[in-house]
Amino acid sequence: TCVGGGFTITATHDAIPATNAAPIYQWQQSADGGVNWTSIANATTPVLTVSSTTQAMNGMRYRILSQSGSCAIAASGSTTLVVNARPSITLASPTVNLTPGKTTTITGSSSPAAATWSWSLNGATIGGTGNTQVVNIDGLGNYQATVRDVNGCIGTQTVTLTQPSPFTITNTVVNASCHFANNGSLAVFAAGGSGTLAYSIDNGMTFQSSNTFSNLTAGAYNIIVRDAASCTGEISALV
């Protein structure tokens, strides 16, 4: 069984003579390979049902004791429970922010190895039985991968793809001391977008990682901010 799954063990025995009293049963479990046994509360029928398992139950042994009338108590042979962990799934995408014309590929991996993959988008089943999904701007939302691994255990993992948040841009200006002086400066503060931001003061010809421009003469400037997805925002400033 898998972690969180249940199991049922059914005991059978030879026919009991009609003159004997109805048999009584008691299931037991052992966590040390059968050296010591403890009775399971309320487990007094030929069928033992456990609704949920944990990884700590892996290797647990089970047996049943039975007695009819004055006969000696009989102990069954034991059976060992195997509890397999659910698969650990990782979903990776080069970006989780998409813009028009851009695509990304979600790639999944699973341990233990996956036997089958299935996918859903925002709760609705979509095509694909492999470990990848190619996504464009029309496919934004919550992608869930469901894996059945080689042990038959099922696990899920989710990744969310969105559009970058809009830019919010402000600036702080230090004016040049006079019209022909080049001692002005301009700092741009941008929020939003995706990933690392870059800044241009020459209409996008060149970009720099610093948000500060120095040695400026008096005049009007247009600053372009660009994010990792090549989305841009602009702000004008007068130095």
Image (cartoon, grey):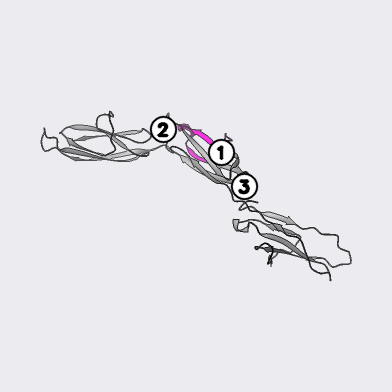
- Mark 1 belongs to which amino acid? Trp
- Which sits earlier in the primary sequence, circle 2 or circle 1? 2
Marks 2 and 1, how far apart in space?
Answer: 22 Å
In the image, residue 200 sits, relative to residue 46, either above or below, namely above
The circle drawn on residue 153 is 3
The circle drawn on residue 99 is 2
Q: Nearer the viewer, residue 133 or 62?
A: 62
Q: Residue 155: horizontal and vertical position, in percent? A: 57, 46
Q: Quadrant of residue 127?
A: top right
Report the magenta residues as a range: 125-143
Residue at 56%, 38% in the rendered image:
119
Q: Nearer the viewer, residue 142 or 59?
A: 59
Q: Residue under label 1, please give it.
A: 119
Q: Are marks 2 and 1 in contact (CB under 8 Å)?
A: no
Looking at the image, residue 57 sits to the left or right of residue 227; the answer is right
- Mark 2 falls on what kind of element? loop
* Residue 150 in magenta stretch: no
Q: Residue 11: horizontal and vertical position, in percent? A: 77, 58
Residue at 55%, 37% in the rendered image:
131
- Mark 3 falls on what kind of element? loop
In the image, residue 37 sits, relative to residue 164, either above or below, namely below
Marks 3 and 2, how far apart in space?
Answer: 36 Å
Q: Residues within 10 Å of mark 2 (few under 14, many from 20)?
A: some
Q: Residues within 10 Å of mark 1 (few under 14, many from 20)?
A: many
In the image, residue 215 sits, relative to residue 5, either above or below, namely above
- Which sits earlier in the primary sequence, circle 3 or circle 2? 2
Q: Residue lying at the far bottom in this picture: please name it.
A: 70
- Which sits earlier in the primary sequence, circle 1 or circle 3? 1
Looking at the image, residue 13 sits to the left or right of residue 5; the answer is right
